[in-house]
Amino acid sequence: MQSNQTSSTMEVETIPSEAKPLPPKPKFEPLKPHEMSDGQVQFRKVNVPPHRYTPLKKVWMDIYTPIYEQMKIDVRMNLKARRVELKTRHDTPDISNLQKCADFVHAFMLGFDVIDAIALLRLDELYIESFEIKDVKTLRGDHLSRAIGRLSGKGGKTKFAIENASKTRIVIADTKIHILGSFANIKIARDSLCSLILGSPAGKVYSKLRAVTARLAERF
């Protein structure tokens, strides 16, 4: 009994072991774009519609220069297949540049001006949304023609008003509508266009736009 007590009260001396220094933290150089894809060249191809072939020839240098010189992406026009072909280079600074350039060329093919579409190269939060009039309401004949007329307005007045109020760009190509802008701004423009398709008069849409833009201005 006594021996048990002595053993329990006995202190055990621990010899502090020498702390081993940790190995140095490895330093890895950032991967280059061509190394991220195992050295494989990335491609994108954008088809050229027949009605955009002549406009593309006129502004080819305006499209080619920012893609080749600023984004460091190779670009060529395949005349036989009628499409614009893009591919990465060894000195491409970012792999996402290829998709940005493809979106830029695609935006031009949809009907946007080069000055507007080039914003897709410089800003990350820009998108293109497309929809048709029949997605909102099934219209035929004169009713469809009047709806397209309401969307553009006299001399494009209504379209420009929506563009300026929502800070977007709109292309109305027959029954297809394309909107270029940020997510929140696209929603504002889309709501206005849908109201016009459904038959709202332009004055009512203008007043609603003024209220929405005033609310946005207060928020920021």
Image: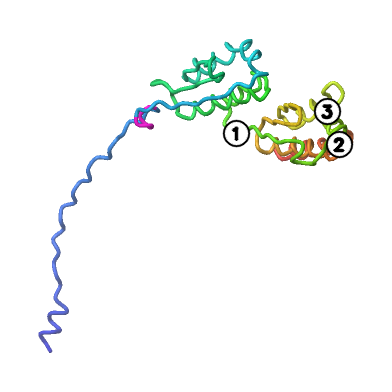
For the residues labelled 1 and 3, the Cα–Cα distance comes to 25 Å
Can the viewer see residue 81? yes
Q: Say what amino acid the circle numbered 1 marks.
A: Glu
Q: Nearer the viewer, mark 1 or mark 3?
A: 3
Q: Quadrant of the C terminus?
A: top right
Q: What residue lies at 64% left-to-right and 32% top-to-bottom?
A: 128
Residue for badge 2: 207
Image spot of residue 216 (x, y percent): 74, 38
Q: What residue lies at 12% left-to-right and 89% top-to-bottom?
A: 1
Image spot of residue 63 (x, y percent): 58, 16
- Residues drawn in magenta: 34-38
204 vs 50: above or below: below
Q: Say what amino acid the circle numbered 3 marks.
A: Thr
- At mark 3, the secondary structure is helix
Label 1 close to label 3 by CB (< 8 Å) = no
The earlier-in-sequence mark between 2 and 1 is: 1
Label 3 close to label 2 by CB (< 8 Å) = no
Image spot of residue 206 (x, y percent): 85, 34
For residue 190, side relative to residue 28 (left or right): right
For the residues labelled 2 and 1, the Cα–Cα distance comes to 27 Å
